[in-house]
Amino acid sequence: QVRLEESGGGLVRAGGSLSLACAASTRTFRDYAMGWFRQAPGKKREIVATIDWTGDSTFYNEVVKGRFTVSRDNDKNMIYLQMNNLKPEDAAVYYCAANHDFCSGYGCEAYVYEYFGQGTQVTVSS
């Protein structure tokens, strides 16, 4: 069982930055590849970024590539999402997710992941 807790969401103006964090409660954090998803009202939950067990490999949704950066700290059981140059269309609830397998493409659907956090709201004003 893995418990995930996101933090860092909030309200930001377009062009601004936010940093999200996700704390994982598990003794085997290094066994999990991690991901960030987001879901806007009325829309499907979509992949934002994924990171493998060591942090050496990452994947980004094309719409965030170059603006968002995913990272992890295995000593602290944490993953992060640095979001720069935010756009109104980035507004959503952001979820941290954990899975034993690393996913690095658009086949990284939400149903593939074993665990999700409760989410944190990101609001971007224009």
Image (cartoon, rainbow, N blue to C red):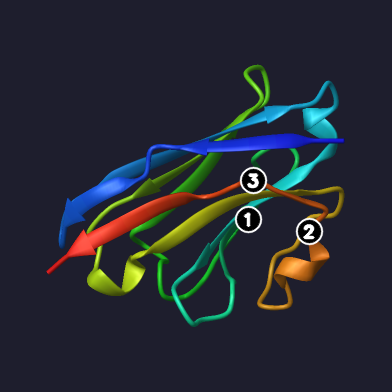
Front-most of residues 58 and 120: 120
Q: How many marks?
A: 3
**View extreme (top): residue:** 75
Residue to which mark 1 is pinned: 50
Could you tell me which residue is drawn at 33 percent across and 59 percent down?
Answer: 67
**Quadrant housing residue 49:** bottom right
Q: Position of residue 7 (x, y in %)?
A: 45, 36
Nearer to us: label 2 or label 1: 2
Mark 2–mark 1 distance (CA, rounded to whole Å): 11 Å
Where the C terminus falls, by quadrant? bottom left
Q: Secondary structure at mark 1?
A: strand
Amino acid type at mark 1: Thr
Nearer to us: label 3 or label 2: 3
Could you tell me which residue is drawn at 23 percent across and 50 percent down?
Answer: 11
Determine whether, in the image, residue 87 is placed left or right of residue 78.
left
Where the N terminus falls, by quadrant? top right
Number of other residues with Cα within 10 Å of mark 1, as a class: few under 14, some 14 to 19, many 20 or more: many
Q: Secondary structure at mark 3?
A: loop
Q: Which mark is residue 117?
A: 3
Could you tell me which residue is drawn at 43 percent across and 41 percent down?
Answer: 20
Residue to which mark 2 is pinned: 113
Q: Which mark is residue 85?
A: none
Amino acid type at mark 3: Gly
Determine whether, in the image, residue 57 is placed left or right of residue 38.
right
Q: Position of residue 84 (x, y in %)?
A: 27, 53
